[in-house]
Amino acid sequence: MKNLLKWPSFVLVLVLSLALAGCSTGEESTGSGGGGGDDNTAAKGTIEQIKERGKLIAGVKYDTKLFGLKDPASGEVEGFDIDIAKALAKQILGDETKVELKEVTSKTRIPMLQNGDIDIIIATMTITDERKEQVDFSDVYFEAGQSLLVKNDSAITGLESLGGVKVLAVKGSTSAQNIREKAPDAEVLEFDNYQDAFTALKAGKGEALTTDNIILIGMQQTDNNYKLVGGNFTSEPYGMAIRKGDSAFVEEVNNLLKSMKDSGEYDTLHEKWLGTKPE
């Protein structure tokens, strides 16, 4: 302080003014919590991001006949889930072609949604309480049930036949968890996707494959040497998954489902891909 008092008064005033200005700026910045461009972008709702980008990015399956299957010859991905994604793009952007389809698996779909790689999951995803802790769901858009796929000459008739049997399932699916609970004496082998699991079944690496009945029906349609057995032993309500807390986008998706059902478009898609109108 003694040294400061020796300075000319105008210099002292300048030093003190700069010091006070620096303190004031620091407090203001802390109080505002940042507010940079990246933060503003992250704070935007999904619908706003879709409109600014000019396309919807949907996470879909590439290996699930009837719901989302990529044709190796044409490169096109087709199925019930794909048509719903197109309908959502049309509702938000006025053009069903303004959709980018990104492949997801049962294991990768939630991380991809949380990381912002996709806007929505439309991929035969069962609504569960555990998943509700990580994502928000739309209303149910399809009701499935878990079953078993075996060779036509298999002695397996249902869950009661699985003691000591190798059962194939997909990583990250509810099916793998369910089969361990309902057939604890079975040996469960997990694969990255349905195509790998079905290939393993055909190669004799297991005696049964388990997942939702409608997915197994799609596999059976590609190879009639296999049959479904055991009926449906779970309830698997499918929902579209949305980032946690984005209630506006949940409402938008639910409005789409309602309008599709009211107009008959949902029944048309159901019959187109699954062979019958919904009950």
Image (cartoon, rainbow, N blue to C red):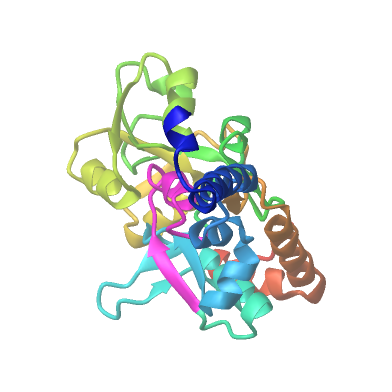
Closer to the camera in the image, 90 or 154 = 90
* Magenta span: 99-121
Residue 241 % position (x, y) = 58, 51
Give the mark count.
0
Residue 87, quarter of the rendered image: bottom right
In this orientation, which residue lies closer to the viewer: 241 or 33?
Answer: 33
180 inside magenta stretch: no
| Residue 162 against residue 15 in the figure, above or below | above
Counting from the top left corner in percent of width and height, residue 82 is at: 51, 69
Whether residue 132 sits left or right of residue 113 in the image: it is right
Q: Is residue 66 visible?
A: no
* Residue 74 located left or right of residue 45: left
Q: Quadrant of residue 76?
A: bottom left
Q: Quadrant of the C terminus?
A: bottom right
Q: Is residue 2 above or below residue 153?
A: above
Residue for point 46% across, 24% down? 159
Task: Identify which residue, 14 or 94, lies in the foreground.
Answer: 14
Residue at x-position 26% and y-position 72%:
72
Q: Is residue 138 left or right of residue 18?
A: right
Where in the figure is residue 177, as x and y percent of width and height? 45, 27
Question: 256 or 12, which lies in front?
Answer: 12
* Residue at x 67% of width, y 46% of height: 245
**Is residue 200 visible in the rendered structure shown here?**
yes
In the rendered structure, does residue 112 fall within the stretch colored magenta? yes
Query: Where 231 sits versus 74, above or below?
Result: above
Q: Residue furthest right?
A: 262
